[in-house]
Amino acid sequence: MHADISYPSPKVHDERPGAFTNPIIATLVTSGARLRLALLESEVTRCGGTSAFCDTDSLAVGCSSGSPAGIPLLDEAAIEAIVAQFNALNPYDHATVPHLLKVEYPDHSDLRCFAVSAKRYILHRLRPGKRIQIVKASESALGAIIGRTRNESTPKLARRIWLAILMKYLSVNPQQRRREYAWSFDVPLRRKFPISQPAILKRLGAYNQSRLFDFRVKPFGFVQTTTPDRQAGDGDVLPIAPYDADVRKSMKLQWVDFNSGDPIRLDWHRSAMAGTIGVTRLADYVENYHRHPEAKAADADGHPAGPQTVGPLFHLRVRSRRLSRIGKEVDRLDEDEGASLEPELPIVYERNDLADDIAYLAQFPQATIASEIGMSERRWRDIVHARTTHRDSRAARIRAIAMNYRLRQTQNARHKPH
C-alpha cells in the first residue's frame, strides 16, 4: 500500500509478493469475512440467541434444552432459517462452494460446549455411564507445548488437558477419572519453536562450537524454551536450549537467556537453590488455562471480564481517546501463530507531527495555550517561532492540547447551523 505520509517502524521485513499477489482482493476478502461474521452475530442476537464462542470463520450458537438457566437459546428451526439466509448470499459457483454457511456436527444433537474465551473451548458429549466423549478440543495457546512423552502429540495433549478441566466441573465415571488422572501434569512446561531468526541461532553459538556439523543446531531446526516461575534481577529472562523431546535429557543441556545470551541455571525440581531460576510446571499452566479472562468482553455489569467471571459475556463499550496507527510486521518464517520467541505486540507507526501541532496551536491566543501547556507565554512564543526547543516532557502535552482543539473545532462545525 502507498501513501504520501511515511511512518517509521523499528522493525520492517521485506515484503516479496508472489505471482498471484493482489492486495486489493486480499483486503476485500478479509473484510468481507469479518462483515459476514458481524452480520451472523447480529442476526443471532436479533432472534434472541447467543453464542458460546466465535473465531474468524465460525460462530457457535446455543441450541440445547440442557443449557444452564439464563442462557438465551435458539431452536433448530431458527438456526436453519439463519443458515438459509446467508446461503442465499453465496456469490460462488454452488457446485464448487455449495454453502456459504453450514452447520458443523449435524448428527450430534447432544453436543455440549465448555468455553473459556473466544478461542479456548471444548466440544464434548455425555455418553452412557457418565463418560465424556471429546468431539473437538481447542488447541489455542497449547500448540507449541511439548508432550510429556515422545508419543504425546499436541492433539493428544490438548484433549487430556481439556478432559482434566472438565472433570473439575462435571460428574464423570470413576473409572474414566482414575484412568485419566494417572496422567500427571507435574512436569516442566516446555515449548517448541522453529529457528526462524538468525538471533536464535547466534544464542546457541557456544553449543555449536564444540560439536561436529552433523550434531549442531542448524537453521530451520527447532529450539525449546521454558517459562520461569519467577524472575531473577531486573530484566525478563527467556531460557532457550537445543530441542530434545526427552525432558530428562533437556535438564542436562546448557540453557541460555534468549534476550541476553548469558548462560543460566534452571531449578527443575523447585529446590530454590541460590543462583537458579525456577521452572513453571505444566500443572500450574493447566490450572491457569481455564481461568483465562476474555479481555475483549464485558461482564453483566459492563466491566472487563476477569478470571472469576462466569456466565454470558457482553460487548465492551470502547471510547477512543487518540488515533494510533498500528500494524504487524510479519516475517515470512514466523507467519504461524505462536511461532516467534518475541512478544506478539503490535508495532506503532509514528511520524514527527509535533511541528504541525505547534503550527496549528499558534493560531490561538498565545497566553491561553501557554497556560494550558504549563509554561510562560514568552517561552511558548519562542517555540512557535523556532527560537528555542521544547522539552520532551512537554511534547505529549502539546499533542494532547492540539488534539482537543481539533476535536472541539470538529464538534462546533457539526452543530453550526447551515
Image: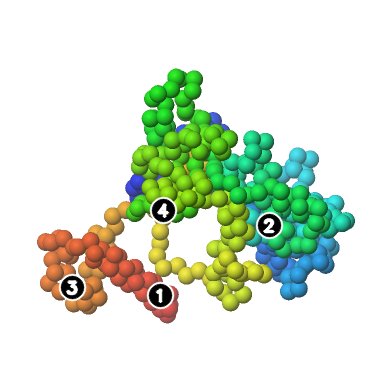
Kind of residue at disc 1: Gln
Identify which residue, 339 or 23, lies in the foreground. 339
Q: Which residue lies furthest to the right in this view?
A: 128
Q: Are marks 3 and 1 in contact (CB under 8 Å)?
A: no
- Find residue 334 and name its label: none
**Could you give the CA–CA distance between mark 1 and mark 4, rounded to whole angstroms?**
49 Å
**Which circle's residue, 4 or 3, is located before the other in the chain?**
4
The residue under label 3 is: 375
Question: Badge 1: how crowded within 10 Å, few (<14), some, or many (20+)?
Answer: few
Which type of secondary structure does the marked residue at label 2 adopt?
Answer: helix
**Which circle's residue, 2 or 4, is located before the other in the chain?**
2
The residue under label 1 is: 411
Q: Could you tell me residue 245's position as x and y percent? A: 58, 35
Nearest to viewer (mark 2 / mark 1): 2
Kind of residue at disc 4: Gln
The residue under label 4 is: 231
Q: Which residue is painted at 76% across and 54% down in the image?
A: 177
> Above or below — where is 251 with respect to 389?
above
**Could you give the CA–CA distance between mark 3 and mark 1, rounded to whole angstroms?**
28 Å
Which type of secondary structure does the marked residue at label 1 adopt?
Answer: helix
